[in-house]
Amino acid sequence: MVVTSSDALELRLFDEQESELIARSLVALAKVAPADANVLSRLMGRLAELNRLVWTTASLRDRGTLGNEGRDQKTLVNHLVATDGLSGDLELPFKATLQRTFLLGKIQFLRAFVKATFALRDSDVDLNLLELQLREELAQSIYTQMAEELLLALLRKPSVKAETKRRAAEQLITIWDNATLEIDDFCPLLESAWHARNRVTPNLGSMIGATEYFRLVSEDCAPQFLDFFARDEVSDHENQAFSEFLFGLTWEEIVSIRQAMKEQGLPAVEEQWAMKVLGRKIDHELDDRATDRVEIDPVSLYRSYQRRQLAADYRILAGGEGPRRTAEAYLMIYLLDLQTS
């Protein structure tokens, strides 16, 4: 496929806001750390090559034939709806694999940029501000990755209705066909929830979650997200998944902490005690302990989501107690079903 001038906008690596920020950041970084700026420029060049490959690959909506079988968007949707997830990415079309690789490459590029500017934040006022802005762009790219994996997770859930899966598959095809799409383009409600959650460090305390809930409100979490889990007909599994979201823990971990509190007669607990009960370190999406400013770590939120998603999948296979989906999945199904209706 020959790329024409009309494809120039599509071939753009970043949206307008990202492009302007990265250009300013490269100029500022080159003044104090030219070697780091050169490394990042080379990484951006590799990313541009991958981006060109994505855009020069045929659309997933195009009609074609392979092995005497017709292929188009409808057959791809049917294929995706029938997957059970056990084959992983082997079940995905070539362009989907390219797009997912591009998004991961973009995330790695932004992580490298944040690392370079963070190391010099005390020596340059401009870099200090730019690093915080780059961290925000990194977070949005990670939210996009999480949303894509959330949609893929719905396809492998046996209890999700076929029509809901079809909507999820159609949304995935739209994402895979346009590498410039970000979460604010197709699910701003989840972006708002993750944006707010990334700015809340759970206190644990009495393990009720009231403090964490009101901190989400103060961080401008979309009221529709909170209202969904506060509605009268909310199920036990939805409540449990929302508790997982609030604390960043799996339901099994929440139960273990509450049981240990009961056995020891503790009305409230702190993080260090909880980590001993769980036998692992608790990640922080927000860290203001080491510096005089607040810094978000979107990778910690991603790890929390993956842990909760893996636990939900395991419960389905093992028949264990607890939610069969993450809080985000329950909301996504509701939104997809609204489209259907």
Image (cartoon, grey):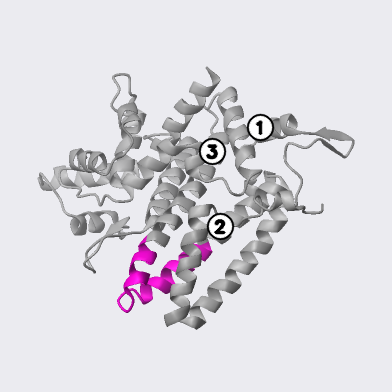
Q: Residues within 10 Å of mark 1 (few under 14, many from 20)?
A: some
> What's the amino acid at mark 1?
Ala
* Residue 36 spot, x, y in % from top left: 49, 78
Label 1 sits on a secondary structure element that is loop
Question: Depth check: 91 or 12 in front?
Answer: 12
Q: Residue furthest top?
A: 341
**Which residue is under mark 1?**
82
Q: Is residue 185 left or right of residue 300?
A: right
Label 3 sits on a secondary structure element that is helix
Considering only order in the chain, which callout, 3 or 1, is on the residue closer to the N terminus?
A: 1
Mark nearer the viewer, 2 or 3: 2
Q: Residue furthest right?
A: 68
Vertical position of residue 75 compared to residue 18: above or below: above
Considering only order in the chain, which callout, 2 or 1, is on the residue closer to the N terminus?
A: 1
The picture quadrant where one finds residue 331 is top left
**Residue at 61% in and 52% down:** 100
**Which residue is under mark 3?**
151
Q: Are marks 1 and 3 in contact (CB under 8 Å)?
A: no
Label 2 sits on a secondary structure element that is helix
* Residue 317 spot, x, y in % from top left: 50, 38
Q: Which mark is residue 104?
A: 2
- Residue range highlighted in magenta: 108-132
**Residue at 23% in and 47% down:** 257
Q: Are marks 2 and 3 in contact (CB under 8 Å)?
A: no
Real-space CA distance between mark 1 and mark 3, rounded to the nearest whole angstrom: 14 Å
Real-space CA distance between mark 1 and mark 2, rounded to the nearest whole angstrom: 26 Å
> Residue 314: within the magenta?
no
Q: Residues within 10 Å of mark 2 (few under 14, many from 20)?
A: some
> What's the amino acid at mark 3?
Leu
Considering only order in the chain, which callout, 3 or 2, is on the residue closer to the N terminus?
A: 2
